[in-house]
Image (cartoon, rainbow, N blue to C red):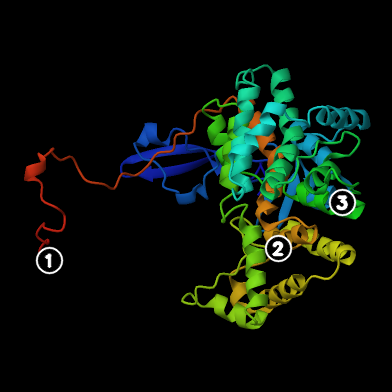
Amino acid sequence: MDKQQAPKTARLILGDKQIDLPVMVGTENELAIDIRKLRSETGAITFDPGMVNTGSCESRITFLDGEKGILRYAGYPIEQLAEKSSFTEVAWLLLKGELPMADELASFEREISRHTMVHEDFRRFFSVFPKAGHPMAICAAAIGALSTFYGDVRFDSSEEERWKAAVRLLAKMPTIASYSYKHHLGQPFMYPRNELDYTANVLHMMFATPCEPFAVDPVIVKALDLLLILHADHEQNCSTSTVRTVASAQSNLFASVSAGISALWGPLHGGANQKVIEMLISIREGKTTAKKFMELAKSKDSGVRLMGFGHRVYKNYDPRARILKQACHDVLARTGANPLLEIAMELEGIALSDQYFVERKLYPNVDFYSGIIYQALGIPIDMFTVFFALGRLPGWIAQWMEFHDDPNAKILRPRQIYMGSNQRDYLPRQKRVSAAKKPALAATR
C-alpha cells in the first residue's frame, strides 16, 4: 500500500466514545497509527509488552524489514556497504545521512586519529578494577567517566561541541576497549598509532607489545572492519532505545552511550554471540552430534537452547548472517580450519531443512557467525560484546544526535496498568497478620 492508497485516519470505538486517530506513512510505506491524543480523549492507554507494536520516534538513520530480510543504512543496502565501504565511511553516513566526499572522509579520519589518546590520568582509572572484571563493565564505566574529563559537553551544547564529543568518543572507544583487555592480561597499554587506519589501530592496541614489532594482517583488518559495519546500527533495538531513553532526560552523549553499553551486555542482546560459541564448544566437548543437539533443542524439557537462530525482528534470513557466512570461509582460509564452523554449518543445514525450525522461522542471525569470526581473529570470548559495542557506536551517536534535533522529542515516560492492591489503611505492627496466617478465601461457586 503506497501513500496515496493509505487511509488518513483509523477509527477507534471505546464504549460510547469514538475517536479518529491520524495514520502516518513512512518513506517505505510503513503504516503507524498516531495515538498521542488517545488518553486525553478517551482516558485509555495501549498495552504493548516489549513495545513490539509501538513506534517511539521518527528516524532517518536505518530501515529494517524483518519479513523481507532487508537492512539499509540511510537508504544504502547493507550488502553494498559491506562489499564496498569502510567502517569510518559508514560512521560518517550514519552521522550525516550521506556518503562523504573523498576530502570529507580524509578530514574525518584525520580528526579521529588526533583524538585516539586518552589522558594519562585516565589510564590509571583501569587499575582500580579486578583483573577478572568483565571488559563490558569496564568499558561502560570508562565511557561514563569521560564526562569528568569533558565536563563542558552537555545535551544543550552547540552543534560544534556535540560533533567534537562524537569524534572524541569514536576515537577513544578503541583505546578504552583495548585497555580493558590489556588490564585483564596484565600487559602494558599500547599507545594508538596515527598512521594506522581505525580498525588496524584497534588490533594493534589489542595484540601488540612493546618488546617486539607487530604486523597487522590486512585480511584480519578487512574481516574486523566488515563486522563493525554490520553492527553499526540496527534500528530501535534494546541498547539504541536505551541511549535514546537516557538522552530524553537531556543527559550528555557519554552518559547515554555508557547506558547503551550496559544494555548491549545482556545475553539476549549483544551477548548472544558469546552464547553461540559456548554452545558450539559444548557440542564439541560433549562428544554429541549436531543432529542429537537439534533434537534436544526441540524439547522444552531438555533445557537445551539453540543460540544464534531466530530474531526479534527478522522473520527471514538475517541479511548480515548471509554476508558473514561467506566471510567465515574467507577468514578461516587465512587463519586455518575451525571445527566449530563445521558444527555451525551442520546446525544451519538441519535448521533450514527441519520442518520444526522452518515453521518457526528460526533462521541464522548475525550472532551465529560473528562469534566464529571473532574467535578466528584471536579475540577472546569476553571481548566479543566489546567489539559489538565498538561497531554499534556510530549508530548510538547518530541516534543521540537525531533525538537531540527532534522537535517532537520529550522525556520518555511510559504508562502502566496497575494491578496491585486497592487503597488500604496503615495498621500498627502489633496488629498485622502475616500472609501465611491469613485465612484462605472460601471457594466460590
Task: Measuring from the top left, give residue 58's x and y in whole percent.
Answer: 61, 36
Q: Which mark is residue 317?
A: 2
Horizontal relation, residue 398 to residue 359: left or right: right
Q: Can you see residue 198?
A: yes
Task: Measuring from the top left, give residue 159's x and y in whole percent.
Answer: 70, 19
**Quadrant hosting residue 220:** bottom right
Alpha carbon distance from label 3 to label 2: 23 Å
Q: Is residue 114 above or below residue 26?
A: above
Identify the element where label 3 is drawn: helix
Identify the element where label 1 is drawn: loop
Nearer to us in this view, 338 or 319: 338
The residue where tag 1 is placed is 443
CB atoms at circles 1 and 3 under 8 Å apart?
no
* Residue plotted at (55% across, 39% down): 56
- Earlier-in-chain disc, 1 versus 2: 2
The residue where tag 3 is placed is 222
Nearer the observer: mark 3 or 2; the answer is 3
Mark 2 crowd level (few <14, some 14–19, many ≥20, 10 Å Cα): many
Total residue callouts? 3
Nearer to us in this view, 416 or 14: 416
